[in-house]
């Protein structure tokens, strides 16, 4: 929640007060991405340091955010929104293809969006964890959205006869954990593989989940 300072409403330098506020807010978010997603990290960043990085005053900060936690929350949602939009677009573009090709398109889009900036990975999978009950709820809610996306896609594949008809909630939850863990380790340099190899492996895991041993189309 922003502070209670009354904001000016006139125009200055050809821009409205609303436009100037939006620019300041974006500068604070950009500074948060740099400091939280790289060095020194969320827990070691102060409001003063973030304001210095953004080139703004602490008064301007509190006009936009109640505290650093709100900045981290906004960045976490931004990172997830980018990856989700890329994944949904890939699924729409691959409509009509078989399970393997749709899964490959979706995973490649997700992985490309999630790993395009290493700071996004750190925001989404490292800095957000354990900060507060509020942010933990936000993290779990967004993860549940990814679980539902995978579950729904598996059910649709089953309806087309490409996957076993069953309840995919547990499998989708386990799969999302595997995806996030693998991408985190890959970005950190702990996994020696190309992005295409990562995607191919994830497709194999998903197909194995959707088509258990003994199942026939």
Image (cartoon, rainbow, N blue to C red):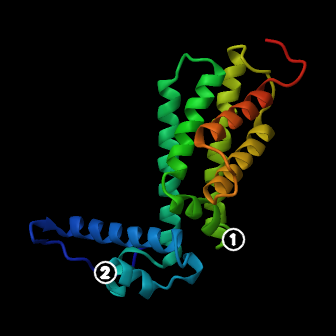
In the picture provided, is 201 more to the left or to the right than 55?
right
> Whole-Å distance between the Cαs marked 1 and 2?
29 Å
Q: Position of residue 216 (x, y in %)?
A: 83, 13
Question: As drawn, which residue projects farthest toward the right?
Answer: 214
Q: Residue at x 65, y 29 (%)?
A: 153
**Image vertical order of residue 138 relative to residue 163, above or below:** below
Dot 2 falls on a residue whose secondary structure is loop
Q: Earlier in the sequence, mark 1 or mark 2?
A: 2
Q: Residue at x 31, y 81 (%)?
A: 56
Mark seen at residue 117 = none
Q: Position of residue 108 (x, y in %)?
A: 56, 37
Q: Position of residue 205 (x, y in %)?
A: 75, 34
> Which of 185/66 is in front?
185
Q: Which residue is mark 1?
A: 130
Q: Quadrant of residue 217?
A: top right
Q: How many marks?
A: 2
Q: Nearer the viewer, mark 1 or mark 2?
A: 2
Q: Residue at x 32, y 86 (%)?
A: 57
Dot 1 falls on a residue whose secondary structure is loop
Question: As drawn, which residue projects farthest toward the front?
Answer: 192
Q: Which quadrant of the figure contains the N terminus?
A: bottom left
Q: Residue at x 69, y 37 (%)?
A: 202
Q: Residues within 10 Å of mark 1 (few under 14, many from 20)?
A: few
Marks 1/2 in contact by CB < 8 Å: the verdict is: no
Q: Position of residue 138 (x, y in %)?
A: 61, 60
Q: Residues within 10 Å of mark 2 (few under 14, many from 20)?
A: few
Q: Which residue is mark 2?
A: 55
**Image vertical order of residue 15 relative to residue 171, above or below:** below
């Amino acid at each position: 929640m922003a502070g209670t300072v009354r904001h000016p409403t006139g125009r200055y330098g050809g821009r409205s007060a609303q436009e100037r506020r939006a620019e300041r807010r974006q500068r604070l978010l950009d500074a948060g991405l740099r400091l939280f997603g790289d060095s020194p990290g969320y827990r070691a960043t102060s409001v003063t340091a973030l304001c210095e990085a953004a080139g703004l005053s602490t008064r301007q900060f509190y006009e936009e955010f109640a505290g650093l936690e709100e900045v981290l929350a906004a960045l976490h949602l931004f990172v997830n929104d980018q990856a989700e939009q890329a994944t949904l677009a890939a699924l729409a573009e691959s409509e009509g293809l078989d399970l393997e090709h749709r899964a490959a398109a979706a995973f490649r889009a997700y992985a490309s969006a999630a790993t395009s900036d290493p700071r996004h990975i750190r925001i989404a999978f490292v800095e957000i964890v354990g900060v507060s009950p509020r942010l933990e709820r936000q993290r779990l809610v967004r993860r549940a959205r990814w679980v539902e996306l995978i579950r729904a896609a598996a059910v649709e594949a089953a309806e087309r006869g490409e996957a076993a008809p069953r309840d995919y909630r547990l499998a989708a939850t386990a799969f999302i954990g595997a995806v996030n863990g693998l991408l985190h380790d890959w970005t950190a340099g702990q996994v020696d593989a190309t992005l295409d190899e990562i995607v191919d492996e994830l497709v194999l895991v998903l197909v194995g989940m959707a088509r258990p041993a003994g199942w026939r189309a």
